[in-house]
Amino acid sequence: DRQLETPPFDRPKAAGWYEGGATPGEAGTAIAVGHRDTPTGPAVFAALPLVKPGKTIEARRADGRTAVYTVDRVQVFDKSGFPDKEVYGRARRPELRVLTCGGLYSRRTGYSSNVVVFAHLTATR
């Protein structure tokens, strides 16, 4: 249904890759998604809102190599005005988007926003 799914709540430390996008290090936009927290506590991307530009993110590839990305920016987008094309759109160079929940939390509706890290490939080792 063209919706990005998150990993199951019973795997709070898991991050998922959008299989319809680029793989780590490949030209295009690779998408990783994970929970900020679950009913059992902090999850894999609990600290994502604290990431600063210039930091690196390493993604292990299926071939055993590691794609190294440098963070360009971190933004919080309200879910009602989420910029799909900006986040999920195709890129000519290898880029990475890392997403989790953010903003205000309500038991009834969940989080009001999404945190998105924008990064570009700077090395493969």
Image: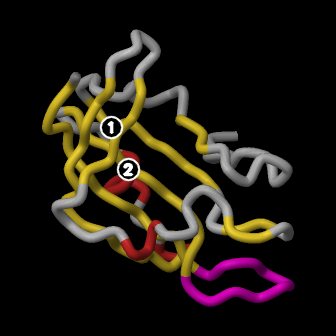
Residue at x-position 85% and y-position 50%: 10
Residue beneath the point at 16% across and 32% down? 123
Residue at (23% x, 59% y) in the render = 55
The amino acid type of the residue labelled 2 equals Arg
Q: Where is mark 2, residue-wise? A: 97
What residue do we see at 39% from left, 75% from top? 50
Mark 1, residue position: 29
Horizontal side, residue 86 vs residue 6: left or right = left
Q: Main secondary structure of the magenta part?
A: strand
Task: Give the Cα distance between marks 2 and 1.
Answer: 7 Å
Q: Is residue 45 left or right of residue 24?
A: right
Q: Is residue 74 above or below residue 122?
A: below
Residue 78 colored magenta?
no
Image quadrant in which the N terminus is located: top right
Q: Secondary structure at mark 2?
A: strand
Q: Are marks 2 and 1 in contact (CB under 8 Å)?
A: yes
Any magenta on residue 105?
A: yes
The segment highlighted magenta reads 103-112
Three-letter amino acid code at the position of disc 1: Thr
